[in-house]
């Protein structure tokens, strides 16, 4: 039912950046090596995600658009989340709040497309596409004027999209990302680009962080690699001298998912407590990986908070690993 879909959709899609997040996560789940996001007018009139992933078959296209028809896990174990997608809600939600068209091709099959607008689904039609998937979302919230009003300026929404793309690009250094602003038509302007990184995970991550946070961060970054009772922590944390006046350069991930979590931010702060004054904030990109059973990432649909089964363990791991790295660097 359209109204119910629209209400539920608001939980998943708060603004253009949340739509971009869902589309890029889907492309990552599909095994894409290159992902391009094009936006117009801060994503309000157009968001288009193009990937070279596995594609969606003709038979699966209508299911992908249907609420809860496609969840990548079978609801029986909501904690056991290995891929980003687990709710089967993003595409139906986007189809409820905008004009959504998916064109896709599975290797060895034909290309097909399907559209949804106002919750009404079109038939599946043959299309032209070399491979992978293009998801195009036009006129976000056109049917819900109340939500339209809550959107900020094109500039602010573009900034939020850029932030989302960069966070996901950090978590996937072997995948290439391009963000293009096509406001006004044509090829537009590339606002962010990161080619797939090479080497081992630390090389790739270091290269990707240099690309996104800049050479100065990379030069001042201490390598973090620690493990405790099933929790693995890797990443880079900057020397105290490279601290910032705000927390803008703090990037935290749990099982590949960008999070903004008080516990983890507090642990980061705690690790630098002896080295930074109150108005300085450490810069770091840290990745915690663990058995999905040890952390609940399903706290909120926007998925930026997490709940560890043992919060003290997560905190202790971060504080001790960072203090150790700082001590080795002479602090
Ligand atoms: P979820 O990601 O939670 O499964 P979504 O609504 O985000 O739900 O996506 C529905 C389904 O559509 C996915 O499970 C996947 O099978 C398919 N899908 C969506 N986007 C892509 C993509 N870019 N490439 C391949 N398959 C996709
Ligand atoms: Mg998804």
Image: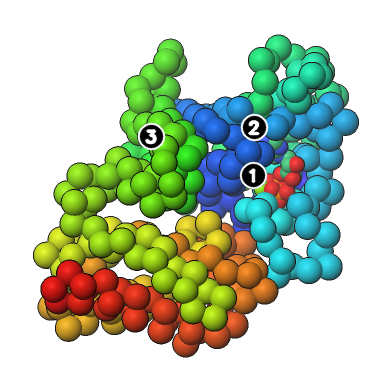
Q: CA distance from mark 2 to mark 1?
A: 8 Å
Task: Name the residue tied to disc 1.
Answer: 29
Secondary-structure class at tag 1: helix
In terms of sequence position, does the residue under pointer 3 or pointer 2 come before the other?
2
Numbered tag placed on residue 238 in the rendering: none
Residue 194's label in the rendered image is 3
Q: Residues within 10 Å of mark 1 (few under 14, many from 20)?
A: some
Query: What SS does tag 3 mark?
Result: strand
Q: Are marks 2 and 1 in contact (CB under 8 Å)?
A: yes
Taking depth in this image into account, of 309 and 259 the one nearest to the observer is 309
Vertically, is 321 above or below 310?
Answer: above
Q: Residue 262 location, x and y as percent?
A: 41, 76
Q: Horizontal placement of 207 versus 306: left or right? A: left
* 116 to 17, vertically: above or below: above
- Secondary-structure class at tag 2: loop
Q: Quadrant of ligand 1?
A: top right
Mark number, residue 53 = 2
Measured as percent of width and height from the top left, residue 210 is found at 27, 44
Classify mark 1 as within 8 Å of ligand 1 or not, answering yes or no.
yes
Against 285, residue 144 (above or below) is above
Residue at 49 percent across and 79 percent down: it is 228
Residue located 55% across and 61% down the image: 255
């Amino acid at each position: 039912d359209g109204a119910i879909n629209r209400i539920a959709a608001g939980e998943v899609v708060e603004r253009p950046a949340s739509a971009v997040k869902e589309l890029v996560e889907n492309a990552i789940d599909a095994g894409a090596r290159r992902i391009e996001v094009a936006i117009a007018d801060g994503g309000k009139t157009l968001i288009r995600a193009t990937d070279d992933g596995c594609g969606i078959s003709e038979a699966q296209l209508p299911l992908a658009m249907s609420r809860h028809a496609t969840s990548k896990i079978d609801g029986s174990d909501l904690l056991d989340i290995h891929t980003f997608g687990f709710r089967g809600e993003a595409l139906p939600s986007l189809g409820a709040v905008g004009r959504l068209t998916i064109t896709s091709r599975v290797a060895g099959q034909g290309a097909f497309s399907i559209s949804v607008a106002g919750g009404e689904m079109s038939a599946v039609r043959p299309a032209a596409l070399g491979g992978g998937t293009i998801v195009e979302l036009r006129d976000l919230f056109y049917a819900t004027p109340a939500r339209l009003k809550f959107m900020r300026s094109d500039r602010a929404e573009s900034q939020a999209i850029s932030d989302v793309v960069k966070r996901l690009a950090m978590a996937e250094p072997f995948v290439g990302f391009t963000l293009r602003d096509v406001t006004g038509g044509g090829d537009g302007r590339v606002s962010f680009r990161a080619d797939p990184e090479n080497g081992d995970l630390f090389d790739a991550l270091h290269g990707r962080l240099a690309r996104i946070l800049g050479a100065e961060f990379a030069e001042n970054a201490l390598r973090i690699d620690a493990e405790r009772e099933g929790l693995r922590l890797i990443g880079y944390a900057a020397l105290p001298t490279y601290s910032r006046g705000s927390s803008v350069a703090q990037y935290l991930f749990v099982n590949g998912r960008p999070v903004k979590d008080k516990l983890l931010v507090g642990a980061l702060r705690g690790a630098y407590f002896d080295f930074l004054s109150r108005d300085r904030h450490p810069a770091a990109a840290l990745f915690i990986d663990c058995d999905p059973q040890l952390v609940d990432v399903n706290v909120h649909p926007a998925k930026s908070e997490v709940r560890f089964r043992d919060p003290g363990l997560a905190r202790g791991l971060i504080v001790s690993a960072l203090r150790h790295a700082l001590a080795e660097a002479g602090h």
